[in-house]
Image (spheres, rainbow, N blue to C red):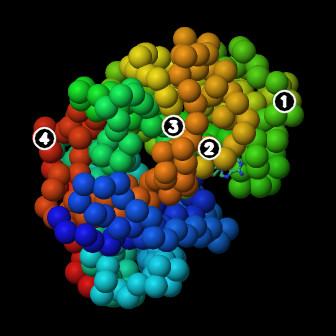
Amino acid sequence: MAQSIYLGLMSGTSFDGVDGVAVQFVPGQPLQVLAASARSFEPALREALFALQTPGHNEIEREAQIANQLAHDYALTTNELLQQAALKPSQVQALGVHGQTIRHQPTLGYTRQINNPARLAELTSIDVVADFRSRDIAAGGQGAPLVCAFHAVQFGAPDETRVICNIGGISNITILAAEETTGGFDCGPGNALLDYWANLHLGTPYDTNGCFALSGKVNENLLHTLLAGHYFALPPPKSTGRELFNSAWLNIRLEKFDTLPPQDVQATLTALTAHSIARAIAQFASRCQAIYVCGGGARNPALMQMLGAALSTAGLAHATLSTTDTLGVPAQQVEACAFAWLAMRCVTRAPGNLPSVTGAAGPRVLGALYPR
Ligand SMILES: Nc1ncnc2c1ncn2[C@@H]1O[C@H](COP(=O)(O)OP(=O)(O)O)[C@@H](O)[C@H]1O
Ligand SMILES: [Mg+2]
């Protein structure tokens, strides 16, 4: 592969907006970020995406309209990246765009990330690569997490057993041990339940800087009830989404705790994310020496503090905890970089999945190309 420039756009299960990067790949070197941009969704788009999470009236039409709106937002982010990096569309090999997950049902044989990639190619004059997850599912895999292969090439080290932990709406880990197969899976809810509860009680999209959680106390009985959830005990390969970890999942479990102050529930949900991650690392990567967090969860001090404590409780006091900024890629840019990398793999006809992670029958080239 010669030196090449790709763009990556990620909009995840938090429904907060789009994170984008322009990157340069030089053979044999770590990727270099040329530009980065983050764009929040308008409240109306967020609401429309939430509404599409569950079956409802006229959803095919609504999906198509929202996909067009997303393509418009993705094009604006793309233009910002081109301007920042002083690039012309013709200098970009391809744009990898994840799309917005509205269903993830690998056991039923499908996942759906909405977007209108044809429109995006038309709006940007750049080759667009989309629909990265379907091929892995067609090969019997979970279609997720897909970031692990990128984590392995970007963050793997011969002298340290590392875990990369991405805390988006859902949390996932990648286990990188020298001379061992890369492992990884979705641990459970990342920010999704925290955002739901903060929105319900504060009216804000998330618990800014974890202040609401820090004003409350973790309720051990509730934490125990939440951690007893069936998903946490499943063996990998496994992946999850808002189909499972949503307000209904939480509200059933809160029924016996209806006198708890809302800030204590927020603290306990934050502890749930922390403990589910710490337990997953303790069970599958007990020799891990360093944990590097990425995704929006890295910006929640209450969550980072509780994760540190949960790691100690789980017997991982020896492992250091920091963010991927330490490894040269800012926490907020890692997933977008992964989709630029996956686009590069598609264009060069190289596999993008790790069967050891997703459970697919073998390595597969991921994504569908929409030429400019
Ligand atoms: N300052 C902050 N304080 C607390 N939480 C934050 C902060 N900034 C971002 N977050 C959290 O990060 C989430 C977005 O993370 P992101 O990695 O984009 O997730 P996704 O990939 O699911 O879109 C927000 O919904 C919020 O929960
Ligand atoms: Mg996001």
Place residue 245 in its image quadrant: top right
Q: Which mark is residue 337?
A: none
Q: Amino acid at mark 3?
A: Tyr
Q: CA distance from mark 1 to mark 4?
A: 47 Å
Q: Which residue is mark 1?
A: 216
Of residues 151 and 255, which is closer to you in this image?
151
Residue depicted at 49% across the width and 53% down the height: 329
Of residues 181 and 120, which is closer to you in this image?
181
Q: For disc 4, does the CB lie below 8 Å from ligand 1?
A: no
> Are the residues at dot 2 and dot 4 in contact (C-beta closer than 8 Å)?
no
Q: Amino acid at mark 4?
A: Gly
Q: Secondary structure at mark 2?
A: helix
Place residue 144 in its image quadrant: top left
Q: Amino acid at mark 1?
A: Gly
Q: CA distance from mark 2 to mark 3?
A: 9 Å
Q: Secondary structure at mark 1?
A: loop
Closer to us: mark 2 or mark 4? 2
